[in-house]
Image (spheres, rainbow, N blue to C red):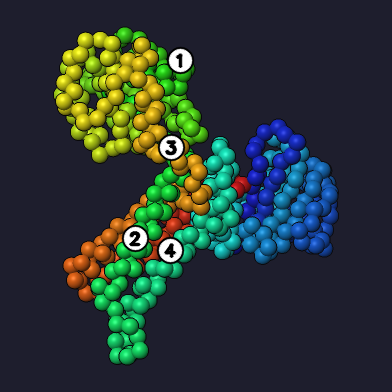
Amino acid sequence: MEDTIAAISTTTGVGAISIIRISGSDALEIVNKVFTKDLTKVKTHTINYGFIKNKEEKIDEVLVSVMKAPKTFTCEDVVEINCHGGIATTNKVLEVLLENGARLAEPGEFTKRAFLNGRIDLLEAEATMDLISSKAESARKISINTLTGETSNLIKKLRSELIAIISNIEVNIDYPEYEDIEVLTNDSILPNVIEFKTKLEEIIKKSEDSKVIKEGIKVGIIGRPNVGKSSLLNSLIEEEKAIVTDIPGTTRDIVEGNLILDGITLNIIDTAGIRQTNDRVEQIGVERSLKIIDTSDLVIYILNNNEKITYEEKELLEKIKDKKKIIVVNKIDLENKLDKSLLDNYIEISVKENIGINKIKEEIKRLFNIGEITSNDMTYLSNARSISLLKKSLNNINESIDEIKNSSPIDIVELNLKEAWNNLGEVIGETYTDELLDELFSRFCLGK
């Protein structure tokens, strides 16, 4: 981070204003070379009027904001140039800055520097991008609570409680001769560990609810050809999105549609019918359908009421047995030939006669607790990375409880508690790898 970076921070296009951001130890010096006013003599956090020039040519009339370290987003000297919003003008100003010593910033590099310089933690960094991409008011609330540090404080409190347990164990291991310390045994720490586990489980549950609020629910509709997948998609979203014919294999690629259910977005995907085929194009569609099963939050599996279940359909039932799912029996207006004793729970519908569609919506509400989660406290985690780390930490806690119950030495129990503490640290960036940062910040837009 020794060099000075620059990038366009606003959306590229025609508009009233574009902002170019420069950050680094040479930010003032670089802008000073191309600005008609001496910025070394201005006060910090001021806005200054003038022109950006390239040698003797005036490029644009601008307002330049000067913000000196450390009270800036990146904790470095930051200069922001507010220029007119034309594409050619904005690109020319950026070009002049790059020619005078700045380097084009990588995606997310400004936020990455803010994290590495201690201005924000990893949760707050992710919330910055989430706030920009928020599409619903509830998602905005979650992002702003995370951005202001409230969610980070929740994790810090958890780590503090866990380190208190670990510290007591450490004292007993390192200083067994001290008479004025409480002698810890497996039985004496078990209640504290169980209490911690209960708190962690509650946070995971509410965090998964928050993820649903922010990202919506990805719903994959699967089944073999001609069972009514496309018709169901159209019925759910009340729009003729997918092509419907009597010809099996009509849908060869995924078709998507959205539905708002009590304030929660359902991202519904109609997949190609899953069957053995020699058609290479259809084979690709089937492969994509199978991937949708793995990546969906919910699978709607459709069977035909008027046909016997096939071997391939039984295989699909086995594949989705551990997934959150709704099994739908379609075409109940036709003669029953399906052996329903093979199914645990199912909903009977007729898309053609518009029978039972609302039952599917009600089951989705039940499965995801929709209706109650929207009123939850917004101070919870809401992205897959963080929730995955919470679950890893919970696994560590469960392993430590098993060790305690098996009368393992207390220093062995401590290893799992430390691992749980480290996983919680990775949530907020107290512990991290360079590969994690590179992957995470690469998702950000340029100039952020």
User: Residue 262: in sight, yes or no?
Assistant: yes
When asked about the image quadrant of residue 433, the answer is: bottom left
- Image disc number at residue 240: 1
Where residue 397 sits: x, y (%)? 31, 62
Residue in front for this viewpoint, 166 or 386: 166
Q: Earlier in the sequence, mark 3 or mark 4?
A: 4
Task: Specify few, some or many for label 1: CA neighbours under 10 Å numbering under 14, 14-19, or 20 or more.
Answer: few
Q: Quadrant of residue 286?
A: top left
Binning the other alpha carbons within 10 Å of mark 3 as few (below 14), some (14 to 19) or many (20 upward) gives many
Decide: is 355 above or below 64.
above
Give the x, y percent position of residue 99.
68, 49
Q: On the image, numbered disc 3 is attached to which residue?
A: 370
Q: Between 177 and 428, which is closer to the camera in this rendering?
A: 177
Tag nearer the camera, 2 or 1: 2
Separation of residues labelled 4 and 1 (CA atoms) = 49 Å
**Does label 2 or label 3 sit earlier along the sequence?**
2
Q: Which mark is residue 73?
A: none
Can residue 25 be seen here? The reply is no
Q: Write the residue at 57% across / 39% down.
A: 137
Q: Of the residues tagged 1 and 3, which is closer to the observer? A: 3
Q: Going 58% across and 49% down the picture, which residue do you hit?
A: 144
Q: Secondary structure at mark 4?
A: helix
Residue plotted at (54% across, 57% down): 150
Coordinates of residue 167 in the picture (x, y in percent): 37, 76
Q: Nearer the viewer, mark 3 or mark 4?
A: 3
- Disc 2 residue type? Lys
Name the amino acid, label 1. Glu
Exactly how many numbered labels are in the figure?
A: 4
Q: Earlier in the sequence, mark 4 or mark 2?
A: 4
Secondary structure, mark 1, is loop
The secondary structure type at the circle numbered 3 is loop
